[in-house]
Amino acid sequence: MAVGKITFTKTEREKLAEVLWLLNWISVLTGVILFGLGLFLKIEIQKWQEVMSEQGILYVPHMLITTGLAACGINYLGSKICLDCADTNKFLRWKLVMMPYIVCTFCFTACVLAGALLCYTIRSQLEQSLYLGLRSAMRFYKDTDTPGRCYLKKTLDMLQIQFQCCGNTDYRDWFHIQWISSRYLDMTNSAVVDRVRSNVEGKYLMDSVPFSCCSTLSSSPCIQHNLSNPAAHRHYDQQSQQLNLWRRGCQQALLDHYTGIMQSIALTVLLIWLFELLVLTGVRYLQTAMENVIRLGDPESESEGWILENSLAETACYNFNIIKNLGKCYQVDEDPNINIPTAAADQEVPPLQVRVSVTS
Amino acid sequence: MALMVVKFDLKKRVKLAQTVWFMYWFAVLAGILVLSLGLFFKIELRKRSELMDNNESHFLPNLLITMGLIACGINAFGGKVCYDSLDPLKFAKWKPVLKSFLVFCLGFNALLVVTSLLCFVMRIPLQFTLAEGLKNGMKYYKDTDTPGRCYMKRTLDLMQMEFRCCGNDNYRDWFEIQWVSNRYLDFSSKEVKDRIGSNVDGQYLMDGVPFSCCNPSSPRPCIQYQMTNNSAHYSYDHYTEELNVWRRGCRDALLSYYGGIMNTIGALVFLVTVLEVAVTVGLQYVDTSLSTLSNPEDIESESEGFLLEKTVKETFTDIMAKMKSMGKGAKVEEGGEEGVATVS
């Protein structure tokens, strides 16, 4: 009992081949789109990779790039095959390649689906990576003279300005780290020395934030220092406090930004996957229809095409047996040409004796 | 003696008509390009009209939009004429208008050249508009509670951060105006009272700049206040400090931005003009080659195509004579009427 059996006339087969040729060319374009999406995501991640603690997330764009390139190659080959399939003579050229090609396309389509699902699942890993990355970036904010870290200040300032955020989870994160380098601290000043001494680790902490935390929406000039003492500033009421600095944390801002990008990419990849599945089904029908035509011998006759020759269960059993027997290929029990002496010799069937009747 | 004569047979004529038709379609796309460039420039001017005192001249973008629309129309019509020129019946209905259409095209091309030149020249009035607008913008920076000006602070801050500039000519422009609103000044403090007292207009001036002037590339945290007082900050010399705030003035920054846009648009419009001249010449050849058939009944006969019927000098004298006769014709009519009036 075949799965999805459809009968094709000669004209229908030719039409199917033409349509599939066109669809394969469109699939090459979608492969290019996939490649482009992977490249775009890679560039976006590399833009802010300094504030991420590990680069593990890069395997998502790499997978999209490889799948896109594979899509271009596979679908280009498919378009060539489908163009030849309209004619039975040309189809014979491709007969042996068809089955491996279909299996390959099936695996590749599964990869596309995996790529789409990865985009949804990467969020938790990204969250952790951003938290740790931002924490160490803020710690090294002041080290503008240390090689390897001298651009962290600029990166963090540009990040806070562009994404309108401040600190890791909150602007108060800046109160817990020393973000002014000791080079710019006057150690002869008693106030400075007191502050450094009062801290366990000898750090110069204060309740102020860098200028990049300042909000452009505020109606008053930016208040960066003495933030825990609202009374020290004139006209600094509750509403002014809300508008003065950016309230969002940079971890949340970056997470939202990347989640948005990856959700759109995942949606597009899912649509491409559905399209590839459609093309795969069409190619399978074309393959089975052409094979049946050759089996029938008459190129003008109708033939049947299907997705699976037997029902799903039977096909699964059959393939499972093949795999099982692959392992048994060196066992010789079933070969009748080899004589294996068995323990129970008396159970041997006695050789047949032909009785010769003597006619007298 | 005609100018630039070329001999045509049927095959050559067909090829010419096809090429010119193809070029006309490119010219339609070029017209759409000019239209979109005009729209883009208009939007860019609108975006920052606050910084130009809402006083900026929209003459150039409007001109570009109009020229783009006219170009699309002319080129579509020209393409249709070229397409029909392959069929003598259809071409016959276009024949009477073709001469005046070609003259109109010539005038349009001249106007395109003028537009292209204008793109390079309009930079100068823009400079003055920007200077005036930015000066006023800085004056209203503190008026975040005055209706109509409450977004000036945000606009200026965003502009200074985006264009990496500070003040009008440089950051010292902020020292000359009061950019902190009186609401945020503590009038009971002696320091504030002294400062206001020492100023003629009673303004609170200080050697500080807004936070949007700060340069993120600076190795030390931004020094916004008491910028000219070296002793107020540790290890600071305001004469040698270059990375602290943006050094560029916003007028320069905005001018180079808009200047770049206008130069690009001017260059593109010039290229479009070259294309338009080429298609006009092509249409002239199509027209003349179909009008000078040696045997008017036989379309396969040979013909000549030319750019001008007579030489340039003779054509020029012809045009002058025509204009003079038109002028004299009007005079004679007036004289005749007077004569008639006096006779009776």
Image: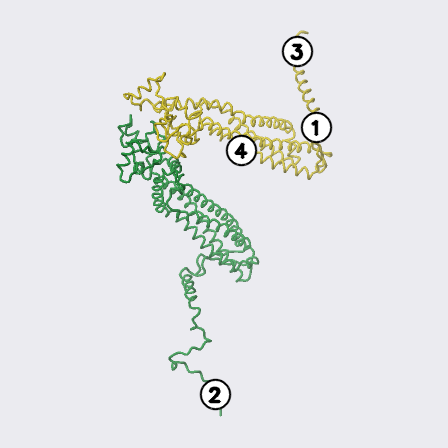
Chain colours: A green, B yellow
Q: CA distance from mark 2 to mark 4?
A: 107 Å
Residue at mark 1? B309
- Chain letter for mark 3, please: B
Residue B277, horizontal then vertical, whole percent: 62, 31
Q: Residues within 10 Å of mark 2 (few under 14, many from 20)?
A: few
Proximity of marks 2 and 3: CB atoms separated by less than 8 Å: no
Q: Secondary structure at mark 2?
A: loop
**Which residue is drawn at the image coordinates 36% and 43% (left, top)?**
A133
Q: Depth check: give the residue in front, B60 or A220.
A: A220
Q: CA distance from mark 1 to mark 2?
A: 124 Å
Q: Residue at x 45, y 53 (%)?
A: A108
Q: Are marks 1 and 3 in contact (CB under 8 Å)?
A: no
Looking at the image, residue B217 sits to the left or right of residue B124; the answer is left
Nearest the eye: B312 or A171? A171
Kindly report the distance in space between the C-alpha atoms of the residues bearing marks 4 and 3: 54 Å
Left or right: residue B324 versus residue B67 is right
Q: Is residue B159 visible?
A: no
The tag on residue B65 is none
Q: Nearer the viewer, residue B153 or B270?
A: B153
Disc 3 designates what residue? B337
Labels 4 and 1 in the same subunit = yes
Badge 4: residue crowd in 10 Å (few <14, some 14–19, many ≥20): many
Quarter of the N terminus of chain A within the rendering: bottom left
Residue B42 can be seen in this image? yes
Circle 2 marks a residue in which chain?
A: A
Residue at the bottom extreme of this rendering: A360
* Residue under disc 2 on the same chain as residue under disc 3: no
Counting from the top left corner in percent of width and height, residue B202 is at 34, 17
| Cβ atoms at labels 1 and 2 below 8 Å apart | no
**Callout 3: SS:** helix
Give the residue type that dot 3 points to: Glu
Residue located beneath label 2 in the image: A356
